[in-house]
Amino acid sequence: MAKPKEGPQSPSAKAQDAADGYKIGDPGAFARNMVQVGVQSQQLLTDFVRRQASKAGSGEPVDPLNITGAFTELLRGMVADPGAIMEAQFQLWRDYMGLWERTARRMMGGDVEPVVSPASNDKRFRDKDWQENQIFDFIKQSYLLTANWMQETVAKANENLDPKTKKRIEFYTKQFADAIAPTNFVLTNPEVLRTTLQSNGENLIKGLNNLLEDLDAKSGQLSIRQSADTFRIGENIATAPGKVVFRNELIELLQFDPTTEQVYKTPLLIFPPWINKFYILDLRPENSFIRWATAQGYTVFVASWVNPDKKLAKKTFEDYMREGIFAGLDAVTAATGEKKVNCIGYCIGGTLLSATLAYMAAEKDDRVNSATFFAAQADFTEAGDLQVFVDDEQLEALKQQMDEAGGVLEGGKMATTFNMLRANDLIWSFVVSNYLLGKEPAPFDLLYWNSDTTRMPEATHLFYLRQFYKNNCLSQGKLVLGDQKLDLSKVKIPVYLQSAKDDHIAPFRSVYKSTSLFGGPIRFIIAGSGHIAGVINPPAAKKYQYWTNDAFGMTPDGKMGKPYPAKVEDWQSSAKETLGSWWPDWDAWLSKLSGPKVLARKPGDGKLKVLGDAPGTYVTIKAR
């Protein structure tokens, strides 16, 4: 006999199903687990208070981010215009009244539109109960109303402040708004609450164990795991075949095995950022830029920066130029016999390359044939949210921290800074998943690399922050290296500028400013995505897109268009969008600058002896 078709559930049945999701599985087990959670939490809190008390007399800065200074300025702005604050409070009250009215209508069965909705890219409210459960929907909307109101009110109260102070206040206000989101707490996150009740609190026990595992036993510093620790450098990540052919205190130079019978005559030398490790360019075979560039017929060399310890604390920015770029160029010439080298600089490695090229131009040193910049800035007037961490008070606090650590900035502190730029994605999502839901992080090569941090020598790091981020000396022609005043307009070699649409570290508007700084032919493009995925986007993935405009600057075939307009928006208005990876565009450009084909070179063929297998030893040095 056929089963009768089931009709749609009645409202009461739906309510019963929803309620069943929030029932305790075993009250006895739940009570025992909650006792254990309470005891462990109390111990963690006691340890935290003890460590904070011990820091009080240690000389460490109490407010290293100078948040107090920022909000003192905000308070002055609010006091100066009390009428605006009253009006803002009245507006918030009216919005809440509207929310109450719509919620009441929905509870009575009415069909109402939300007062406020999350942004389309906000992943925090994906659980169905944020929409279907009336209570959680109200919690969500009341939070969004408050968070939006708070940020808008702060922005208006900031209008008369200088732009840098204004930006810092808005940044920290958003950090506060993100931290108090209902998604970050057990009782106001439906997924966490359901899991806690149904598992009798086992998720919180596992979460506390994850938290204890992530806490450094000595310092109490929390390092949130973003990826399962299943990757092994040289085994399942950073596996492109090659050799170490040179080593000094700052770099190991890796030469990668050719995969074509012939290669371009001019070799390619890559300088990644020393803030992270080089294998962002060689994560897995399918997304390895190194493997791809080798397959296009380039002889690829990469500088693998050392993870510096206290012995290297005095290394300067100029040392990174001489022992990094100059030593790398000399080694490539020794390995290949070529006097001309094409170079790539990524992020801070690109900033170093820019300064070095200006120094070389002043010295009449023409060893660099062309320069490519991945997400690298030379003008820092619009350098993104990292600017909020650079003022006199914060730099002095940073110096104190590095002095306490023996002259280096510990890698975890830099990682936290970068994670704060995308706090919901890189901090709070893992707090919820790892510590509230008790899940183990999934294996993710990019996030594993992101957490494989490096230290920074004090002398180099402070010079970089002061001379570039704070004073913007390079773009203004005020930076001095080796007694040479640097002028980027004297750099006449071809330049390729890659930027990314959603880059929050090197915004495309900031990268674009370099089109007016260098004195030679320039090709500028904007890629889809951000600081990492915008760069690491192999053609086979068929992801994202990029924008070009051959009316301006240099085309891939070497032709020259009009000078770049002053504003990037004028360049964008007639730019062409192309689906997929920008790598082939770069290859078309660089191949024309790389000379004829010659027999492929293998590591050890030239004057440099093989010192070991890639990826070398420097990349395996851990920061903690």
Image (cartoon, helix red, strand yellow):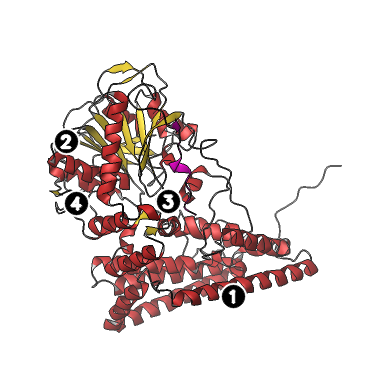
Q: Secondary structure at mark 1?
A: helix
Residue named by callout 4 = 474
Q: State the CA–CA distance, disc 3 to disc 2.
A: 31 Å
Residue 176 in the image, given as x and y percentages of width and height: 44, 69
Q: Is residue 447 visible?
A: yes
Q: Nearer the viewer, mark 2 or mark 4?
A: 2
Q: Nearer the viewer, mark 3 or mark 4?
A: 3
Nearest to the observer: residue 333 or residue 194 = 333
**Mark 3 or mark 2: whose residue is earlier in sequence:** 2
For label 4, count other residues whose C-alpha is less than 10 Å away and answer few (under 14), some (14-19) or many (20+).
many
Left/right of residue 603 with respect to residue 351 in the rendered view = right
Which residue is located at x 39 percent, y 79 percent?
A: 89
> Which amino acid type is shown beneath numbered disc 4?
Leu
Q: Is residue 620 magenta?
A: yes
Q: State the CA–CA distance, disc 2 to disc 4.
A: 19 Å
> Which amino acid type is shown beneath numbered disc 1?
Thr
- Which quadrant of the figure has residue 609? top left
